[in-house]
Amino acid sequence: MRVRITFAKTKAMRYTSHLDLRSTWERTMRRAKLPLAYSQGYNPRPKFNLASALPLGFTSEAEMIEMWFDERRSIAAITAALEPVLPPGLALIQIEEVDLHAEKLPNLLQSAAYTVTLLEHEPSLDKRVTNLRDQTSIMRERRGKSYDLRLLIEDLRLDDSAPHGEQNIIMRLSARPGATGRPDEVLEALGINPYDTLIRRTRLFLGQG
């Protein structure tokens, strides 16, 4: 059996690394006494995949993980087993069964949406966002290699529904292998220090597979 879990990663776990998050889920499955399947060989590993690594300091309401079980369980039984043992900082949103032969979750990921809340007021933010969005090319460097950030930005705008006095930026960035946009790089291109913001991932967009 293969299940896909959508979960939130909240403030209590915002500084938990991707590797530690994997270990947390493995321990959680053991506490829930669910029949997690393991790989074969000299060093068996639990069979599960996270959709995408979430950078340190980010929170999320749309993380996804897929797990394989040796035995079938109802979705209701899996939910009932997991909810009491989830650590602070993780919250279940949805659990669904996935076809055993479907494409793996990381290969399905196409893009990710983020909401960025500014902690300090930025003047002329609407003009800066518009100017950046209207550019045809935004050349930057990552790990010594040049790339065009503009090609990775699918949507960029201010949140018109933000409370009075609050500045929120909504962005949807490519998350395909070899073409992943990072919110902190968009913020830097806007002249904003990423450390003066709170970044929340709000949705993962999957392709067909």
Image (cartoon, rainbow, N blue to C red):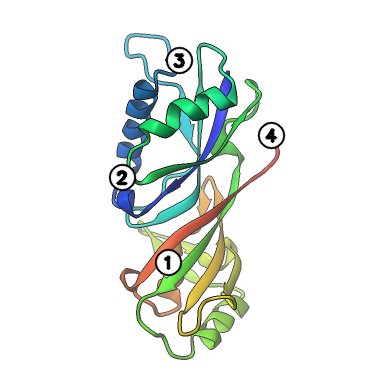
Element under label 1?
helix
Residue closest to the far bottom: 124
Give the spatial CA distance, label 3 vs label 1: 41 Å
As drawn, the label of residue 35 is 3
Measured as percent of width and height from the top left, residue 150 is found at 56, 68
Q: Is residue 12 left or right of residue 123?
A: left
Element under label 4?
loop
Q: Is residue 195 above or below residue 82?
A: below
Give the spatial CA distance, label 4 vs label 2: 28 Å
Q: Which residue is mark 2?
A: 17
Q: Earlier in the sequence, mark 4 or mark 2?
A: 2
Q: Which residue is mark 4?
A: 209
As drawn, the label of residue 185 is 1
Type of amino acid at the residue the image marks with label 2 = Ser
Type of amino acid at the residue the image marks with label 3 = Pro
Q: Earlier in the sequence, mark 1 or mark 4?
A: 1
Type of amino acid at the residue the image marks with label 4 = Gly
Q: Is residue 68 above or below residue 112?
A: above
Viewer-proximal residue among 16 and 145: 16
